[in-house]
Amino acid sequence: MRRTVLVAVVLVMNVGGGDRPTVHAATIRTAPPRSIDTPSSTREEQAIPPPGSQAPDRPGPVPPPDLQGFPTSTAPNELSTVALPNNFSGVTTLFDRLPPEVAGHTRSPQFDRISPERSTVGYGEERRIAGIGNALLRIQAIDVARGDFFPPNWTGVHVIAFMRRAGEAQDAGRDGDLFWMRNETFEQTAGSAERISIYGMLWGRVDSPWIFSIHADDRENRDALLAAFVTAAKSSLQ
């Protein structure tokens, strides 16, 4: 039996102008043995196309969001104090240093996706909605310059600024050259009114094409995964 999962919202860059993103719904079908490839339907990843999704043709250069008006605010968990990797090798090294367990959830290699332009590490399994086939907690790094979804002249912080301007941030800030935002969204399957809460965070540094994100089932687990990332980043420098 095949299950249809609704990807509730996927952001398409509004290259024609305007402040609001163009949002559309997309549907994918997965068979149970391959359900681990089902992309998330969370709004936390609106600007970050899920694995396996069909992205539109990549737009040409688009004027990036203005960063000047971004509010100044200290990043959570001393995130601004660590160096972020700026290439695939650095991302792989850092992710290899992530702990085998976070907040009581063990690392789930079946949900890991490692590639030069998009790498994901998962913990636990999402069981709140049957058949989703995702990690309960996950951390991800995307090189926006290598994919085919973002304007080629954008960096990771431009994506963050775009999402904040579109009203997707619960809170956000600039701490030195680090930009970050947190949001709280939801996930659901097609044909069901049930929604589950998703707690996300994104961050990146000015002039870097890499954007990092976290997806978790509650605020505490989101913060725990961020703390694990900071610890791994510090250890990679030793």
Image (cartoon, rainbow, N blue to C red):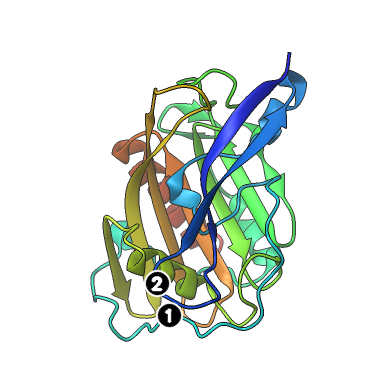
> Considering depth in this image, is 83 or 50 the residue closer to the camera?
50
Residue for point 51% across, 59% down: 47
Disc 2: which residue: 161
Residue for point 27% across, 55% down: 170
Instruction: Give x and y (percent) for residue 24.
Output: 53, 51
Dot 2 falls on a residue whose secondary structure is helix
Image quadrant assignment for residue 106? top right
Count neighbours of disc 1 (C-alpha within 10 A) and say few if under 14, some if 14 to 19, many if 20 or more: some
- Identify the mark nearer the N-term, 2 or 1: 1
Which disc number belongs to residue 65?
1
> Considering depth in this image, is 131 or 73 the residue closer to the camera?
131
| Residue 101 versus residue 75 in the image, above or below | above
| Residue 156 versus residue 118 in the image, above or below | below
Image quadrant assignment for residue 88? bottom right
Instruction: Give x and y (percent) for residue 4.
Output: 64, 26
> Considering depth in this image, is 203 or 97 the residue closer to the camera?
203
Horizontal side, residue 229 vs residue 199: left or right: right
